[in-house]
Image (spheres, helix red, strand yellow):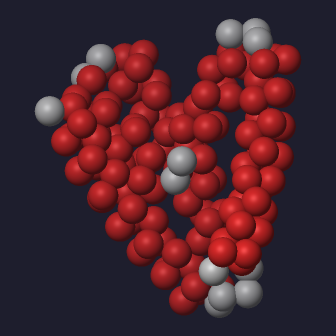
Amino acid sequence: MNLIIVGLGGGLGAMLRYLSYQGMIRVFGPGLPWGTAFVNVFGSFLMGLAAIYFLERAGAPRLGGFIMPGVLGGFTTFSAFSLDAARLMETGRLGAAALYVGGSVVISILGLFAGLAIGRTLL
């Protein structure tokens, strides 16, 4: 049941991400990735609010699952990344946080370039 709840939230989050992208293109034009920047920053902000409420206050696991990995995970995975990094920092694991943040960004970009290269070779 939890998997279904998270999946439904993820679908809703993906639709909200799409609508956000389209809205940003209408407002700012297609020149820069404003939609991506918006969902990453706003999604991270919302994840912070949700983490306080669901993880530290409410203890409502189903609704928390729908909102956090579901809606916000579908809206942007950057919000989950931000939460993980913040939790490492808040627990004093600054070295682990720096490695996680730097490594995630660099390795993700390298992974994207690897996918581009393989895709261009095969397709």
Question: Residue at position x 36%, y 25% from top?
Answer: 54
Where 16 sits versus 85, above or below? below
Q: Mark yes or no: residue 36 visible.
A: yes
Q: Quadrant of residue 2?
A: top left
Q: What residue appears at the point 52 percent right and 75 percent down from the top-left corner? A: 21
Residue 39 screen position, x and y as percent: 55, 60
Tell me, yes or no, if residue 34 can be seen here. Answer: no
Q: Is residue 77 above or below residue 113?
A: above
**Tag count in the figure?**
0
When asked about the image quadrant of residue 80, the answer is: top right
Q: Is residue 60 left or right of residue 99?
A: left
Task: Classify the position of the N terminus by image quarter.
Answer: top left
Where in the figure is residue 6, as x and y percent of width and height? 28, 41
Which residue occupies the extreme top position in the image? Answer: 92
The residue at 30%/17% (across/down) is: 59
The residue at the point 42 percent across, 53 percent down is: 74
13 is higher (above) or lower (below) than 34:
above
Residue 114 in the image: above or below residue 54: below
Q: Nearer the viewer, residue 80 or 27?
A: 80
Q: Which quadrant, please, contains the C terminus?
A: bottom right
State the image quarter where residue 89 is shown.
Answer: top right
Of residue 120 and residue 31, the one placed in the foreground of this image is 120
> Which residue occupies the extreme left position in the image?
1
Q: Position of residue 86 (x, y in %)?
A: 66, 26
Measuring from the top left, give residue 69's x and y in whole percent.
40, 39
State left or right for residue 45 relative to residue 119: left
In the rendered structure, the answer to whether residue 16 lies left or right of residue 105 reads: left
